């Protein structure tokens, strides 16, 4: 409505301008006519011109005012129309954004489903690949285990051959207790850093396999004796000075004789190594003396064992006799108690029947 009113005002202003133009034209014609009049009419013309100018000015101002009203209304209408257009565009934008958001949400949902499906397919492919790798791994493991089994079988055959060979060696003759003792000695030497213990004789020699039996028979129990580097035992031959030409002769006499620090060392070395031992105090030991002493000791031990056995037997018999006496005393005590009870019973019976006996005697 404001826009229509503005347009009407513009039309009215145009009509007014047209009228003004007609009036102006008429006045102009009058002016032309006035020029033809005498100069006395010049002042009247001037007045008319001035009046015309004032009239034109007033009309122009009036038209301007009339034009300002619809222009302002037009501006207001344009501003209001702009607001309406802005609101409409904003509403359209909101609708578009809402539609776009719904479309984006649907697209995101579809994309998410696509990703889930792709991930599921990827997992299925990964499972198939892992199954294939597991199958290949099983095959490789079986092949590897077969190879290891063959290697172990070959190693077992090899170890069996070595065991068979070892059983034929002199070391096989070592008794379990002796072997454990040697191992204990090695452990103690390593633990306490003891030097000079070189090990048993059997580990210090090497010979052809065909001589094993001869070496074992010759060495006997001395085969497993420990070789200990010690100042307590010194070979006598090393302390003798003689020409090299006489080595065999002196060896024949003194090779099996050693000088020992004291009697205990001499006795132990003579017993374990089977050599003749002497001390600086001129006491001499040899294997025969040791064997003789051992024999006497064994005889004394056997006699002592017999005495101990007889003593144990006598003690056992004495303990048995003591037990029998104790049992007899217990039995005697029981019999005595039983006899006392019976005597008391007899006395009671006699006391009961005594009045009756007296009555019978009177009758």
Image: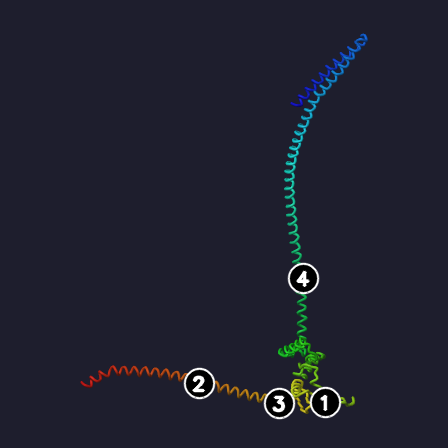
Image quarter of residue 67: top right
Q: Earlier in the sequence, mark 2 or mark 4?
A: 4
For the residues labelled 1 and 4, the Cα–Cα distance comes to: 66 Å
Tell me whether the residue at label 2 lies in contact with that at label 1, contact meaning CB atoms closer than 8 angstroms: no
Which one is in front in this view, the residue at disc 2 or the one at disc 3? 2
Give x and y (percent) for residue 95: 64, 34
Q: Which x, y percent locates residue 119? A: 65, 47
Camera-side mark, 4 or 3 = 3
Residue on which disc 2 sits? 322
**Other-residue count near label 4 (Cα within 10 Å), few / some / many at <14 / 14–19 / ≥20:** few
Where's residue 149, x and y in %?
A: 66, 65
> In the image, what residue occupies the spot 66% across and 51% down?
126
**Gap between marks 2 and 1, in whole Å?**
65 Å
What's the CA distance linking mark 2 and mark 3?
Answer: 42 Å
User: Sequence order check: which comes first, mark 1 or mark 4?
Assistant: 4
Nearest to viewer (mark 1 / mark 4): 1
Residue bearing mark 4? 144
Determine crowd level at label 2: few under 14, some 14-19, many 20+ residues with C-alpha closer than 10 A: few
Proximity of marks 1 and 4: CB atoms separated by less than 8 Å? no
Of badges 2 and 4, nearer the viewer stands 2
Within-10-Å neighbours for mark 3: few <14, some 14–19, many 20+ = few
Alpha carbons under labels 4 and 3: distance apart: 66 Å
The residue singled out by tag 1 in the image is: 254
C-alpha span from label 3 to label 1: 23 Å
Q: Earlier in the sequence, mark 3 or mark 1?
A: 1
Task: Return the residue found at the far left.
Answer: 363
Residue ID for mark 3: 293
Q: Secondary structure at mark 2?
A: helix
Q: Secondary structure at mark 3?
A: helix
């Amino acid at each position: 409505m404001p826009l229509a009113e503005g347009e009407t005002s513009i039309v009215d202003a145009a009509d007014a301008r047209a009228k003004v133009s007609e009036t102006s034209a008429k006045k102009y014609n009058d002016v032309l006519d006035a020029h033809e009049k005498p100069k006395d009419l010049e002042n009247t013309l001037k007045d008319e011109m001035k009046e015309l100018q004032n009239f034109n000015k007033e009309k122009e101002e009036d038209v301007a005012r009339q034009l300002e009203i619809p222009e302002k209304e037009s501006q207001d209408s344009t501003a209001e129309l702009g607001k309406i257009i802005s609101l409409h565009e904003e509403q359209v934008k909101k609708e578009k954004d809402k539609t776009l958001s719904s479309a984006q949400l649907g697209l995101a949902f579809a994309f998410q489903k696509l990703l889930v499906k792709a991930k599921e397919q990827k997992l299925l492919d990964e499972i198939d690949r892992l199954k294939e790798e597991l199958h290949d791994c099983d095959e490789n493991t079986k092949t590897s285990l077969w190879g290891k089994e063959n290697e172990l079988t070959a190693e077992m055959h090899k170890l069996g051959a070595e065991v068979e060979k070892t059983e034929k060696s002199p070391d096989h003759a070592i008794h379990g207790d002796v072997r454990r003792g040697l191992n204990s000695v090695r452990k103690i030497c390593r633990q306490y850093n003891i030097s000079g213990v070189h090990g048993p004789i059997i580990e210090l020699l090497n010979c052809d396999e065909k001589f094993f039996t001869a070496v074992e028979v010759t060495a006997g129990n001395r085969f497993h004796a420990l070789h200990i580097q010690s100042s307590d035992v010194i070979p006598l031959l090393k302390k003798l000075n003689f020409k090299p030409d006489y080595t065999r002769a002196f060896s024949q006499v003194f090779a099996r004789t050693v000088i020992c620090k004291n009697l205990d060392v001499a006795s132990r070395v003579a017993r374990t190594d089977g050599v003749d031992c002497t001390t600086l105090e001129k006491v001499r030991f040899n294997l025969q003396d040791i064997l003789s002493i051992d024999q006497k000791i064994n005889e004394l031990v056997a006699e002592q064992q017999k005495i101990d056995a007889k003593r144990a037997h006598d003690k056992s018999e004495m303990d048995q006799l003591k037990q029998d006496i104790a049992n007899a005393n217990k039995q005697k005590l029981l019999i005595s108690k039983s006899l006392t009870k019976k005597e008391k019973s007899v006395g009671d019976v006699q006391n009961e029947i005594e009045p009756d006996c007296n009555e019978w005697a009177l009758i």
